[in-house]
Image: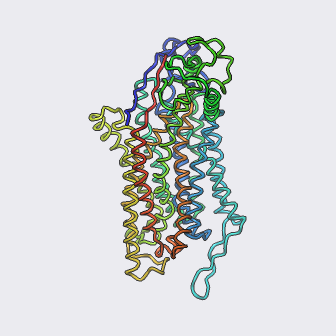
Amino acid sequence: MESESNKVVPICSTNYRTTSKRHPPLERTMSITRDGSMDYRGTPADKRTTGRFKANAFIIGIEIGERLAFYGISANLVTYLTHVLHEGTEKSATNVNNWMGTTFLAPLLGAFLADAFWGRFWTILIFGVVYFVGLVTLTLSVTVDTFKPPSCTHTSFAGIQQCPPATAGQVGFFYFALYLMSLGGGCMKPCIAAFGADQFDEEDIRENEMKKSFFNWWVFGISLGALVSATVLVYVQSYISWGWGFGTPTVLMGIYLVLYIVGLKFYRHNRPTGSPFTQIGQVIVAAVRNFRLRVPADPALLNEVVDKERLQAGTRLIPHSNTMRFLDKAAVLPNISEGSTIGIDDHSPWKLATVTEVEEVKLVLRLLPIWVAALIFQTPSAQISTFYTRQGNTLNVDLGSNFKIPAASLQSIIPLTIVCLIPIYDRIFVPIARHFTGNVRGISMLQRIGIGIIISLLSMVCAATTEIYRVKVARENGLLDEPFQTLPLTVFILLPQYILLGAAEVFTSIGALEFFYDQAPDSMRSLGTAIFLSTIGIGNFLSSMLLSSVVKVTSLCGQSWIVDNLNRCRLDYFYWLLAGLMAANLCFFFALARWYQYKQVTSL
């Protein structure tokens, strides 16, 4: 595995005009950012009044609001689908996974709009409003009689509740609200993290050091929001009402949205640089068109002229690499003598690219194998809101004689673990590891991800063994065919698998978020963040597909592993299957990590 490169700090031009009366022109010139970022007025950003953690107080605020609402709904969604909409085990799990998958694929759209047209600030604001409207609509679906499903008020002569089914219109209105929320929240996600990281100037040594810890404390903040959701909001939904449970995060999201606008003058903005997908297409098309041209042995003879213009616009150069040599043909100067630059401006970007543009496309393509490896890691996380919660619903949730813990609240263990471990990781582990490795992060980003995958594999093994014991207790007490009876087993038996997943998040999720942001081209960082988030979305879809396949195949072989009676399910087999897939994926990831070449940047 190659070591992470140290970025070269360029000596940037400071010939900006300024008419500020608050600071002398020379003083302001010396304090402007050197990464090309601008303030809300469109002038070069001043380090003293913009960015850093002061700006991130508002940005992290809207992320906490978004996370508070998202986890407050997703944590207990399977309970709502089964108890209120009366969906079965497989259908409810599939619907939750599909909704989660859509939510984490929408970031690709948000990243495209932010990088190509709107910029991150406006993309967050626009889709923040969409998200808020979705939350309002969702709250109406559980509070207004016309939209909410009828309650279970009738009891048959056998003592079994008869619950009138929800109408097609009520189900449709609920899912419309759910997916409107998915669109808004999903498109915000990549932009919020990238916008927060943009508040640090990578060309400033001190701010670059701050940025190394940013993602740790970023996840620390949003984990606090998730912790409140999985405890307070889930309790409100379970024992007070769904209206209050959905309405509370809606109001809070509205407040955080207003605060986000209030922080406008503190933000640093990067101008949109055009569609990243267009640039990728241009380089590939140019390489194909120039396939007959020979790549010169000396990389200095490739097209570098436009790179200087990009540097002046705030985009750093990427030196030529010897990987994916075919793409270098996109930067070969056709019919021009070596060293000449005559006629370069006459070439279309679909025929001739620059070295940095080619290398940026290589960076994106180098991310894809790591992205594939990250998909399998997300499949255990997909079980948290579905089978883990269903398991908890069969167990004893009493805490003392007067208090019950909602099964979905056990999900709070994951953010609680994250909140406890991040300070230890950042303040203790990193300095100690740095002493031995010399890496400013303590360990490389890919090493961090690999450790998390191992821990996640252990969590799935733990889940399988716990499920074996749960079913054993049900059998010994004659409760295998009594799915609604509480087993004489405390819900806290599920704690180890939740704690291990929380520990895995500290390593893999934070490491992957930082990796995809850091290794993406400067002009495509929203896309880089979206690529990471898409692993969560596709991981949920893969979980749904795997679940459906398991049900079909095992049904043909006799008894299905997944049935409505959880005590008759073979969830342990399903968990062992996931553990096996993760073990194979771990070997694949180790091979990729040894091959991967970290991004390098340079300056003129």
**Screen quadrant of the N terminus:** top left
Q: Nearer the viewer, residue 237 or 381?
A: 381
Is residue 272 at all visible to an observer of this figure?
Answer: no
Residue that protrudes farthest toward the bottom in the picture = 157
Write the residue at 50% across / 47% down: 372
Write the residue at 42% across / 71% down: 395
- Please state if 583 lies on the left or on the right of 251 as rendered: left
Is residue 206 at all visible to an observer of this figure?
Answer: yes
Q: What is the tally of numbered marks visible in this picture?
A: 0
Q: Position of residue 102 (x, y in %)?
A: 60, 52
State whether residue 259 is above or below residue 568.
Answer: above
Q: Position of residue 41 (x, y in %)?
A: 62, 24
Q: Nearer the viewer, residue 496 or 546?
A: 546
State whether residue 563 is above or below residue 276.
Answer: below
Q: Position of residue 239 (x, y in %)?
A: 52, 67
Q: Position of residue 75 (x, y in %)?
A: 51, 59
Write the residue at 53% across / 12% down: 25
State whether residue 367 is above or below residue 405.
Answer: above
Write the residue at 39% across / 55% down: 457
The image's colouring method is rainbow
Q: Nearer the viewer, residue 213 or 108?
A: 108
Quarter occupied by residue 326: top right
State whether residue 217 is above or below residue 345.
Answer: below
Quarter occupied by residue 470: bottom left
